[in-house]
Amino acid sequence: MAKQISILIVDDEETVRDSLYNWFLEDGYHVECAENAKQALAMMESGHFDIVLADIKMPGMDGLEMLRRIKSLKRDTMVIVMTAFATVNTAVKALKDGAFDYVTKPFDPDDLSHLIRNASKQIVLQEENETLKDHISSLERVEDLVGRSEAMQKVFREIENVAPTNSSVIITGESGTGKELVARAIHANSPRKFYPLVSVHCGALSESLLESELFGHEKGAFTGAMYNRKGRFEMADSGTIFLDEIATISTKMQIELLRVIETKTFVRVGGNKEITSDFRVVCATNKDLKTLVDQGAFREDLYYRLNVVNIHIPPLRERIEDIPLLADYFINKYCTTMNRPLLTIDQAVLDRLALYPFPGNIRELENMIERAIVVGNGKKIMLRDLPFGKEILDNDIESLDEFEKAFIQQILNKYSWNISRTAKALKVDRVTLYNKIKKYDLKPSDQQI
Amino acid sequence: MDQPDQKHITILSFGYFDKDFLDKLAHPVRFELKTDVSIREAHLDLSEYFDPSRRQYNGNRLLKTVDEMAPPDSLKTIGLFQVDLFIPILTYIFGQAYLNGRSGIVSLYRLLNERYGMAHDENLLFERTIKEVIHELGHTFGLIHCHDPSCVMRSGTYVEDIDQKDAHLCSVCREKAGLK
């Protein structure tokens, strides 16, 4: 036996106590005895017992009252009540009050052995369950969410505040900022964490597919519906549903969604039975939903229903202080995955990354680091291992001005010297671009003329 | 009858037992527990231990009495009975002993095949008795129930359980009892 189970015997009859004491001792249990409920409760306050075997009829406080007190004192303790044949009804009441089981005295030796063995198994399973829950919690800490910047610290605080509630959340942020990770963190830190987190990428599905995906369908609901299928709302019962790219859903689906979120009931496609599901909604979008509401592209009532809490994730270019930390994190992640020795990163690379606007945000940084680990062959990630600005890096640029000049030249060439498109790509206005062209005396290269 | 010495096990028989049956018991017990075995007849008025409401004999009280009757020069003592034993909480017992103590009791009553509607089998009864005697003596040596299916210290609540195990201690129990 891996764990020694402790048993407390509570009976006013000495012979019963002694008999059980010897019996369990021979089975290798840790056994103690109490002659009444008061003594037993005092022993339970100072010590731990996995199983309490108690007589129902005792002078003073009876076994039922003791059971109720034990359950309020130590909920996990398994109480087995012993009763005479005439008091089976009382034993049934004890079961309703939370007793694990009951035995009628005198009992068959095999019944007693089985009962205690079952209780012991249950205790071991409960403990395993707790251990596994802790393990899952540690796995679900969502380690990919990395950031020391004030902006990310604010996001972490918001996650911490909103996670334990049932409120709907909208996560906003540019593509690649980690909206799904924030959704996972909210779920993992909520009381719903032991139930599913069901993700739906609304943008990837047509209206009819999304309807079937969300609500499920009955066999024969449409061509190809060969079997009944549970929808995502049904699968998310007691858990969280994460609706990514919520801004892309059609007006019809917006109405459906609003109704389901308000009533928590729905009907499968092709079905007529109303299904109830207790889910929490977390949405994400890279669009400005308020603007879409103003433009009439997104229903205002749904917007307010979803937007109880808004968590905005800043783009990477607005928190460049997180880049070294993120780079280290991804180096660690990919070196471990690829079974490579841990690499370091050259300071020049970090300096260069800090200047890069990262339109693809963290996802882009992650890809860059993964690529650098694959293509690089040293112990350090160098500038040459990075995928961007190859043309610039080939030159011996030493100042920021030289870098800006080379970079603008490159983008101008890319857009065939179309000033409007280049200015848009660089996120500057045309006048600024003209001034830069003039400042750096930029000219179309031969190929562009 | 074996001659007692300073460190021996005593089997006290209460009621009628075939002499050959008792003599044959000594050898396997001696072999298993590496201790000399002495077999003696003893007498008790068992009616004092009879519980009319259960029509059985009180095992707790009998164990206490055997413990009091144990010869002072005996290391461990087992009382052998032919009556149906019970303890207050259980419907029946095959035997019981003081864990890490000096005494134990075993009854042949529920070891008999006839109790289960089958023909008498002397060899089977003998095997079951040896196993129960060694089992209870094992408890007096401080051994608790063992999970090894073949170990004699495996808990047995039905005669079929007793038939399943061997009359020997497993190596773990042997070591725990200091018999290696």
Image (cartoon, grey):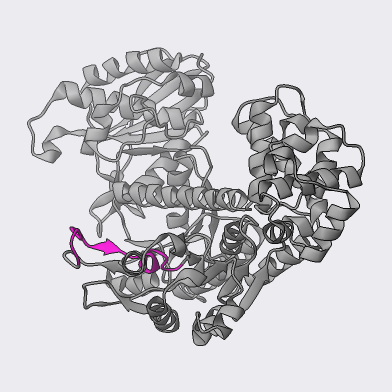
Residue A339 location in percent, x, y?
62, 26
Report if residue B59 is visible in the image. Answer: yes
| B115 lies above or below A55 | above
**Looking at the image, which residue sits at the far front?**
A449
Q: Position of residue A332 (x, y in %)?
A: 70, 36
Q: Nearer the viewer, residue A51 or B2?
A: A51
Asked whether A223 or B112 is in front, the reply is A223
Q: Nearer the viewer, residue A183 or A393?
A: A393
Q: Position of residue B162 (x, y in %)?
A: 27, 31
Secondary structure, magenta segment, majority class:
loop
Q: Residue at x 35, y 21 (%)?
A: B39
Residue that sits furthest to the bottom in the current view: A301
Residue occupying image coordinates x 53% and y 16%: B6
**Quadrant of res A91:** bottom left
The residue lying at 58 percent from left, 76 percent from top is A289
Instruction: Residue B64: say if magenta.
Output: no
Q: Quadrant of residue B4?
A: top left
Kindly give the residue lying farthest to the right in the view shown: A399
Q: Could one spot residue A19 in this view of the protein?
A: no
The magenta stretch spans which residues? A222-238
Q: For the N terminus of chain B, which image quadrant? A: top left
- Residue A47 in which image quadrant: bottom right
- Residue at image coords 81%, 58%: A149
In this view, A294 is above or below A391? below
